[in-house]
Image (spheres, grey):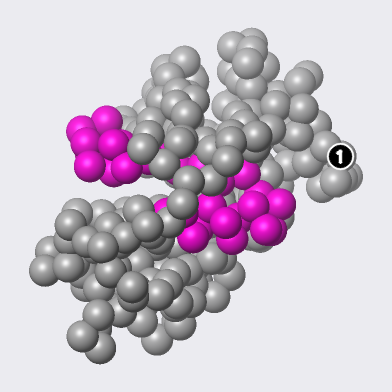
Amino acid sequence: MIEKTKIIRHLEKDIIRNCNFINFIEDNTVYQYITEGNSVLVKGRSDENWLYISSTSQTELKKLMSQCNEDEYFAVVEDWMIPFIMEGKMLDWKLSCVKLYFPDNLKLPSNKGDCDNQTVSLVAEEAEYIYSNYYKYQQYVTAEYIRERIKKGVALGIYEDGKLAAWIMTHDDGAIGLLNVLEDYRKKGYGYKLTIEMIKRLRKNNKIPFVHIENDNEKSMNLALKVGFCKYGDVHWIKRINK
């Protein structure tokens, strides 16, 4: 039997590449670990049955994929891995992002905003409201997933006029995400304020703050770079199906 602690120690040797992987193992149900040389694959459950892979070897990845013929959902896939994952399969959908991380030695900028509204911790009862106002990404999340993230991760919001106007939380792999500011409350610095507070919370929990942003999402990318995040590389979430 492969020990979880040994897998995590191995993954920590390349902590920025594998921070998603480590967080997923620690916070979700993992039902299978597979190793091949220095490569690791896990199968675990959050909203779907996800596969996470850490590898730098085409030969090892090919051997790992031979044991995953029926699996559909793959997380944080690097560019070079896609042909091996998709061999003999069809693409149902792919979400592509740039992975960025906040360096450990970087000083956090001051959290100044145009409004004095404070950040508060979200509660699970707000999940349906958040989902109904998360139009662009409803294909990739569910209200139940959001509810679980509020319960298990860091989830913050800002209220104005008695209404939840902006929010942010961590995904099932620890990535900062689900950031949204309602249209009537934009240009007040809420996204910046929430991002800074999130970084503080993650650092307090000894976690690496990191985020995934689509290339065409200029506002979010500019915000992340302004705060001090550094680009790591392109990653993808894939659902594949049989031909």
Q: Is 44 rendered above or below residue 116? A: above
Q: Position of residue 120 (x, y in %)?
A: 45, 77
**Res. 86 image quadrant:** top left
Query: Residue 221 in magenta?
Result: yes
Residue drawn where x is 64% and y is 13% of the image:
57
Residue drawn where x is 65% and y is 34% of the image:
105
Residue drawn where x is 35% and y is 67% of the image:
167
Residue drawn where x is 47% and y is 15% of the image:
80
Q: Say which amino acid is labelled 1.
A: Lys
* Residue at the disc numbered 1: 6
Q: Is 58 rendered above or below residue 194? A: above
SS of the residue at dot 1?
A: helix
Query: Residue 6 in magenta?
Result: no
Q: Nearer the viewer, residue 170 or 44?
A: 170
Q: Which quarter of the figure is the N terminus placed in? A: top right
**Are there few (<14), some (14-19), or many (20+) residues within 10 Å of tag 1?**
few
* Residue 105 appears left or right of 89: right
Q: Nearer the viewer, residue 5 or 125?
A: 125
Q: Position of residue 32 (x, y in %)?
A: 70, 47
* In the image, farthest residue toward the left: 184
Q: Which quarter of the figure is the C terminus placed in? A: top left
Q: Nearer the viewer, residue 21 or 2?
A: 21
* Residue 87 appears left or right of 1: left
Tell me if residue 128 can be seen.
no
Give the residues in magenta: 195-224
